Image: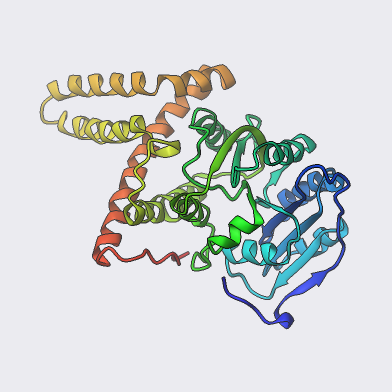
């Protein structure tokens, strides 16, 4: 982690004190860059759990709005950088000044509940050998548009069906013992944009033998409003490509989260389906093969589509199917690009700094 001169940051010194010493003390750390209304809702939710935690630390990563002032108004400790350096640096600096035994990282566009905090503290109290935990988004996303509902519900579903022995860490709702965090060196600050810095930290934790638990009842609400352009840019440039490089670096081909075997098979089938649709213009018989491939895709992902049908109904689910198959297409593209980037560098450590 890089260090910075004292005159490069601004602080306010309000502190929340933990009134219950029977469980580990908790420091909440929130990185923010021009958080807007979502951040204000995040702060409002944090103010409701202030009596359960030792301190709330907000690291303003060069915002040009009033994020710092809003954080100070709820009594948070505030660190402000003059220019953006990425959430990895912001989280590390928050951890540097934190005094709690447990560091709980949350994003600036989520809200927490008192139950969330109570569960985290209880789990760490009852499981002294557990080093870190991650939660999930809840099933009631904040933004009402289709893409936001689809993406956040899909994230919720993925975490709810995954192995509780987690394969990585998650910065939007992830807690870790402070000593363990620094034992592996914190977040990699070469990630200058919101990317896979949390996944990379998780891989290092697992490689060092630390235990990460997925606690499915520890949930936060995601408020982000996704649009097609922002979603594709984030998932391709800031997730799929750098995550692929991490996978090759650490050979982490685990059957978990977004890397389940069913997803890998679905990715291949989706590309075969596209080939069938194109080839059908020369031989209509190939379209019948495409119908078979589509049927296989539906059957393979039936539990996901059943989940969406139960939550949002038939029309919503039909839209989900189209976006889900498109997700496999651009996910496959990201894997190819990431693989090429990794091996063109001779298999060296991936360069985390990505173009905007």
Q: Is residue 142 visible?
A: no
Relative to residue 234, is residue 84 depicted above or below?
A: below
Image-quadrant location for residue 13: bottom right
Residue sitting nearer the eye, 328 or 283: 328
Check the image and name the residue furthest to the front: 129
Residue at figure coordinates x 46%, y 42% from the top left: 167
Residue at figure coordinates x 31%, y 53% from the top left: 248
Which quadrant does the N terminus fall into? bottom right
- Measuring from the top left, give residue 182's x and y in whole percent: 59, 62
- Measuring from the top left, give residue 270's x and y in whole percent: 29, 33
Q: Is residue 332 visible?
A: yes
Residue at figure coordinates x 68%, y 37% from the top left: 123
Relative to residue 75, is residue 195 drawn left or right? left
Relative to residue 253, is residue 353 drawn left or right? right
Relative to residue 169, is residue 320 depicted above or below?
A: above
- Measuring from the top left, give residue 10's x and y in whole percent: 77, 74
Image-quadrant location for residue 96: bottom right
Relative to residue 96, is residue 82 depicted above or below?
A: below
Relative to residue 39, is residue 1 drawn left or right? left
Image-quadrant location for residue 245: bottom left
- Measuring from the top left, give residue 226's x and y in whole percent: 56, 44
Residue sitting nearer the eye, 44 or 210: 210
């Amino acid at each position: 982690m890089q260090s910075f001169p004292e005159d490069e940051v601004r602080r306010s010194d309000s502190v929340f004190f933990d009134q219950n010493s029977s469980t580990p003390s908790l420091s909440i750390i929130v990185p923010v860059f021009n958080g807007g209304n979502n951040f204000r809702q995040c702060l409002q939710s944090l103010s409701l759990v202030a009596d359960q935690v030792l301190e709330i630390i907000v690291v303003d990563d060069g915002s040009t709005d009033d994020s710092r002032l809003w954080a100070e108004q709820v009594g948070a400790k505030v660190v402000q950088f003059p220019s953006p350096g990425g959430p990895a640096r912001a989280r590390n600096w928050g951890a540097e000044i934190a005094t709690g035994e447990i560091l709980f990282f949350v994003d600036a566009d989520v809200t927490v509940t008192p139950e969330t905090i109570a569960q985290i503290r209880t789990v760490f109290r009852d499981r002294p050998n557990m080093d870190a935990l991650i939660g999930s988004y809840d099933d009631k996303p904040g933004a009402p548009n289709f893409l936001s509902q689809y993406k956040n519900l899909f994230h919720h579903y993925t975490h709810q069906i995954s192995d509780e022995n987690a394969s990585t860490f998650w910065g939007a709702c992830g807690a870790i013992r402070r000593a363990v965090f620094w034992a592996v060196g914190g977040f990699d600050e070469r990630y200058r944009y919101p990317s896979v810095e949390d996944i990379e930290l998780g891989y290092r934790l697992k490689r060092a033998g630390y235990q990460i638990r997925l606690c499915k009842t520890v949930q936060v609400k995601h408020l982000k409003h996704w649009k097609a352009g922002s979603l594709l840019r984030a998932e391709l440039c800031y997730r799929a490509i750098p995550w692929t490089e991490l996978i090759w670096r650490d050979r982490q081909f685990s059957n978990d989260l977004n890397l389940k075997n069913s997803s890998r098979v679905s990715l291949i089938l989706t590309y075969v389906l596209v080939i069938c649709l194109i080839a059908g213009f020369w031989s209509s018989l190939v379209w019948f093969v495409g119908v078979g491939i589509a049927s296989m895709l539906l059957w393979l992902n039936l539990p996901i589509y059943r989940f969406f049908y139960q939550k949002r109904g038939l029309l919503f689910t039909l839209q989900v199917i189209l976006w889900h198959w498109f997700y496999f297409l651009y996910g496959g593209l990201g894997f190819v690009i990431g693989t090429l980037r990794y091996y063109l560098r001779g298999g060296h450590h991936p360069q985390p700094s990505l173009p905007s």
